[in-house]
């Protein structure tokens, strides 16, 4: 395995930015400090650049198996590493849905052959397979989740089924990650807008249908039930300022039993963007108001929100450009998430140290990933080298998603990922991919 020496780089890690050298050897971070070059080192000049731990994206939909006309584990992991993402956790709404260990293990097998980044998968849970899931040793799973399963059939959202949630909270030993909206409220809103517009509801109505009330009531109830049982609950992709006040920032992440995340699109876009982008920014839960967008960023910075994800959910363009009820919800983001956050840094909204905390340190802590997420000697060398003074524009020539489009097309970013290391292998280098190695499975470290 190659040995690399990154010289004179600004390291962003554990609340500090400092200049040092980093040696990578045998897949690990071997040394940090002032290091003399040896004959075996491949030298990388880090002067003027910043070295971050590899980004860990805790929520993606890479579509394999079953939906590979939109995306697959190779194409989307390639886009991920180009964006500095070295590890991801994929959701259970592939085809078939990941509702048992045989399907889960098959996804791990496919990823081991195809993924350029490290990979983990959530086990799906709903009312149909709850008893089966609870017979497993759930403590070994990264998490169980219902996210995306509501597309398969109505009634699959755990937040809408308090009896199912109670049984899960009382008996599950893993983290429980849920999509938090009340379907009854959404369905009632759908009917109101259908009466007004028929099937061609404008995209601007989406946040009124999948409303603040639908989100807040579901999240408030889920937190109450989780607290009742002392369960480990994670609310996926928070979208409202109102919900942020339900979460704590007075204890460290390691002590939290109730956690949450924000996806980059809910920080970047607001309801004013529907007029320009229409169904291209139709996500569930919906992008909401400017007030919500600002409130989410504030809660991220003050630690009520724990991690940043993308909810990367590619669809074919023709699937997006249909009328409201047929248009698929979700869009691709994993290649551009770090760029988005670095724009907020340039605007003075968030520090580099806080970005690294939310995109690298905290996901590793939250999901119990051993020796990842930090720049420490002995840790896996998952690293991202960034030039903060490199302007470029998102366009079809540089979009790597299999679906071939992005809601960010035409956006100019002012920073660029130059190198990405996965387990010590330089997978991405100034636009060139080195595909001799594959990522490895992410596992929860054993409890003490």
Image (spheres, rainbow, N blue to C red):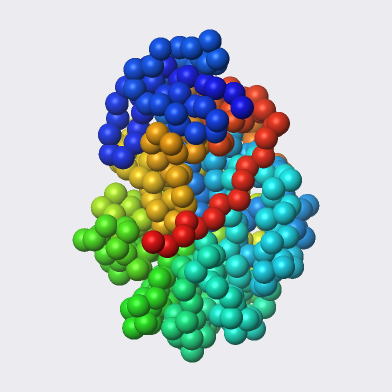
Look at the image and tell me whether residue 239 can be seen: no
Residue 303 in the image, given as x and y percentages of width and height? 29, 54
Tell me the residue at 71%/66% (across/down): 103
| Quadrant for the C terminus in the image | bottom left
Q: Quadrant of residue 426?
A: top right
| Nearer the observer, 11 or 200 | 11
The residue at the far front in this view is: 448
Residue at horizontal 21%, vertical 61%?
250
Q: Exactly how many numbered labels are in the figure?
A: 0
Left or right: 253, with 389 as reference point: left
The residue under the point 55% across, 15% down is 40
Residue 43 against residue 432 in the figure, above or below = above
Q: Is residue 424 left or right of residue 361?
A: right
**Res. 359 in view:** yes
At 40% from the left edge and 34% from the top edge, which residue is drawn?
A: 377
Q: Is residue 65 left or right of residue 220?
A: right
């Amino acid at each position: 395995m190659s040995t690399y020496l990154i010289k004179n780089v600004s390291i962003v890690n554990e609340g500090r930015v400092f200049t040092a050298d980093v040696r990578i050897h045998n897949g690990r971070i071997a040394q940090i400090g002032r290091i003399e070059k040896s004959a075996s080192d491949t030298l990388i000049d880090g002067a003027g650049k910043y070295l971050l731990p590899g980004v860990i994206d805790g929520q993606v939909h890479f579509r394999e198996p079953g939906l590979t006309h939109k995306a697959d584990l190779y194409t989307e992991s390639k886009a991920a590493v180009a964006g500095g993402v070295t590890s991801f956790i994929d959701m259970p709404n592939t085809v078939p849905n990941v509702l048992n260990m045989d399907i889960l293990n098959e996804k791990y097998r496919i990823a081991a052959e195809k993924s350029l980044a490290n990979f983990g998968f959530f086990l799906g849970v709903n009312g149909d397979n709850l008893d089966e899931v609870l017979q497993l040793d759930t403590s070994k799973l990264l998490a169980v989740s219902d996210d995306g399963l509501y597309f398969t059939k109505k009634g699959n959202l755990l937040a809408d089924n308090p009896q199912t949630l109670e049984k899960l909270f009382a008996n599950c030993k893993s983290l429980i990650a849920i999509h938090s909206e009340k379907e009854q409220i959404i369905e009632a809103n759908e009917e109101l807008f259908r009466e007004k517009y028929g099937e061609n509801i404008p995209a601007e109505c989406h946040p009124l249908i999948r409303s603040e009330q639908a989100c807040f009531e579901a999240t408030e109830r889920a937190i109450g039930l989780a607290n009742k049982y002392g369960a480990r609950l994670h609310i996926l992709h928070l979208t409202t300022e109102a919900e942020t006040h339900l979460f704590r920032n007075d204890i460290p992440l390691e002590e939290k039993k109730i956690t949450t995340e924000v996806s980059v699109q809910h920080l970047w876009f607001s309801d004013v963007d529907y007029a320009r982008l229409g169904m291209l920014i139709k996500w569930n839960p919906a992008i909401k108001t400017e007030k919500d967008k600002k409130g989410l960023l504030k809660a991220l910075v003050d630690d009520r929100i724990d991690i940043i994800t993308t909810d990367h959910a590619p669809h074919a363009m023709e699937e997006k450009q249909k009328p409201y009820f047929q248009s698929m919800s979700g869009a691709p983001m994993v290649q551009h998430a770090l760029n988005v956050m670095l724009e907020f840094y340039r605007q003075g909204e968030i520090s580099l140290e806080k970005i690294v905390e939310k995109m690298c340190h905290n996901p590793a802590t939250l999901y119990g990933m051993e020796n990842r997420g930090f720049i420490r000697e002995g840790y896996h060398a998952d690293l991202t080298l960034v030039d903060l003074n490199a302007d470029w524009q998102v366009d079809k020539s540089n979009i790597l998603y299999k679906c071939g489009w992005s809601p960010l097309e035409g956006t100019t970013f002012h920073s660029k990922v130059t190198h990405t290391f996965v387990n010590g292998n330089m997978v991405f280098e100034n636009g060139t991919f080195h595909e001799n190695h594959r990522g490895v499975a992410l596992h929860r470290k054993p409890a003490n």
